[in-house]
Image: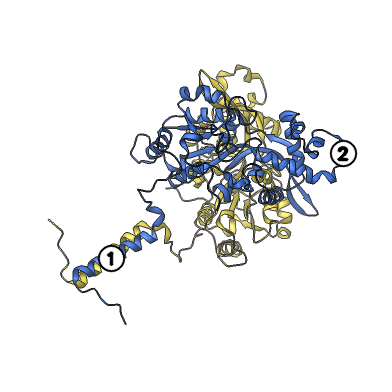
Chain colours: A yellow, B blue
Amino acid sequence: MSPKPPITGLSRRRWLAAVALSATLAACAPMAPSPVADPLPSWNTGANKQRIVDFVRAVGTEGSADYVKPADRIAVFDNDGTLWLEYPLYTQFRFVFDRIRELAPQHPEWQTQQPYQSVIAGDLKGAMAGGIKGMLELLGAAQSGLTPEQLEAVVKRWIDASSDPRFKRPYTELTYQPMQELLRYLRANGFKTYIVSGGTVDFMRAFTAPVYGIPSEQVIGTRQKFAFEVKDGQPSVQMLPQMEFNDDGPGKPVAIAALIGKRPIAAFGNSDGDFQMLQWTTAGAGKRLGMIVHHDDAQREYAYDRDSSIGKLAAGLDQYQAMGWGLISMKNDWKIVFAPPK
Amino acid sequence: MSPKPPITGLSRRRWLAAVALSATLAACAPMAPSPVADPLPSWNTGANKQRIVDFVRAVGTEGSADYVKPADRIAVFDNDGTLWLEYPLYTQFRFVFDRIRELAPQHPEWQTQQPYQSVIAGDLKGAMAGGIKGMLELLGAAQSGLTPEQLEAVVKRWIDASSDPRFKRPYTELTYQPMQELLRYLRANGFKTYIVSGGTVDFMRAFTAPVYGIPSEQVIGTRQKFAFEVKDGQPSVQMLPQMEFNDDGPGKPVAIAALIGKRPIAAFGNSDGDFQMLQWTTAGAGKRLGMIVHHDDAQREYAYDRDSSIGKLAAGLDQYQAMGWGLISMKNDWKIVFAPPK
């Protein structure tokens, strides 16, 4: 049986037109964004929100003097302290410490060897006494002897089972909601969003796609040495304990130039390790955007800057105005810090 | 005046439906590829063409056991000898030699110093006598003291003004038309296409976007050392003469793992420098495609393989069958090699 036809010629025409229109809209939904919705609902109205919106409009308006073609709309984001919680200890080091304890039974020599001994005893101050050199040794020990795929699986398992001691939530829920909106807003306007972080790439790649919508190939970070090997006819790439590249400070613009091959037009960071990345980005010709997230919200997150060993921000605080960068106040610019628990 | 209405209710309905259908198709054109057009018109019918089409269909069919989600459809291509002419001398070295001669007046010491002296005298055999070490020294001398953007401009100027001595055409027209079709075919089916080449990235980035439709961030190659510096308040990234990474042989899977962070599902090469890349790609779980372009066409291009110093192919010839790779015969599989002159 065929469906009952509409009664009049007119209503049948209207019905056909309505069917055609809804089919068109369904097929083309991504092409029809609403022009009225606020793309940054977690940002308070103010100079920083306005600066972002003005920038995106300017570079996205064809015929405008500031227009940038989509292929060159590259935006780079630091991760720790810019997109998610980093205080009082980088999340990657929470993983490294747990992993060292997990591996300890296979390494009896660690029981009497620093900095391993301190990590196993749960003495974090002792564990960090060796400074960056000691931390990188721990990181290499925790993240080697595996393929990158295997490490990703280990990190995923850990991150699903862990939670932050203060906020009692998984680390992947402790991303900054206003920055999540900013990532989506930029992508909706033709930007390609990259992470450029001091964290190591294979740690970050375990969560960047589901958490930030950023695929592994847009994750730039500190890199361990890799070696190609063939065992019993099976080829693999193995992670070695040595570091190959330190993606921090001047390393950030160097990595961007080497791996992306374009100077970004927007850069976001929170510490002096991001200074050169913002400096190089905003010194380019045409309209540029550089912004620093300032941790000034002890109540909802933390307040730290020039005296902190984690996320130290001194040069950035002293020079952001002269550099023409925006200083985002977590306390005043953001309605919420983290998304509410689901 | 309104347009003349159709005479009968039936024809009016048909007319409305036709208008609606054409509007839908026009709005959604990229979503409706023609199912009949041959996507690889320059390939002769045969096992290799069939293998490509079967692979693309299998990984792209949702619900099929071989289905791969678009984010994981990564295809990697060697450049020299796989996408464009490399014989009897890599095009990048033609550039390097010309650039050394251009820079010679600023380097009087080169007049009596090898391998520079030979290059300046036009003695290519002498220039190459120092082997890979001498070649890399020349490359470093030719491509340093500039920012990557400046080098790109120098390469563009050179490539626009140069042509191949045998074919009397610009090098950018000496790309293999069947491989160009393959790149487009893969992208039309949701693949992300990468170049993974022994050439240096900043040389290749001068032409990959217009010539192959591959943006700079999808170009992986040998990398020179870079340094960030600030002079008179102006930050820049400077290219140094030393090499940082050799993207050849086992370096290729290492670079792919480090920079893309995913194992490709398809790899294309032409020499033993691509062996490990194909080996690692095709050893992955699920359906994989590995193919080697065999230069067996002395008439339309060149014939060379195991005895050649440029593009040497011996291990690949001996093992491609055991590895399950396809060996593309330039002579038999390709209707044309280069696109006809415009």
Q: Give the chain of mark 1.
A: A
**Mark 2: amino acid:** Glu
Q: Is residue B117 magenta?
A: no
The residue lying furthest to the bottom in this view is B1
Q: Evaluate whether residue A294 shows in this view.
A: no
- Please tell me which residue lies in front, A239 or A10: A10
Residue under circle 1?
Answer: A18
- Crowding at label 1, few (<14), some or many (≥20) Cα neighbours within 10 Å? few
- Please tell me which residue lies in front, A233 or A140: A233
Residue A254, image x, y percentages = 68, 44
For marks 1 and 2, give the CA distance. 79 Å
- Crowding at label 2, few (<14), some or many (≥20) Cα neighbours within 10 Å? few
- Discs 1, 2: same chain: no
Residue A308 lies in what quarter of the image?
A: top right
Residue A38, image x, y percentages = 48, 63
The residue lying furthest to the left in this view is A1
Residue at 78 percent of width and 54 percent of height: B233
Span shown in magenta: A40-44
Residue A315, image x, y percentages = 73, 51
Instruction: Give the structural element (helix, strand or loop) at label 2.
Output: helix
Residue under circle 2?
Answer: B109
Residue B224's label in the rendered image is none
Q: Give the chain of mark 2.
A: B
Q: Is residue A74 above or below residue A140?
A: below
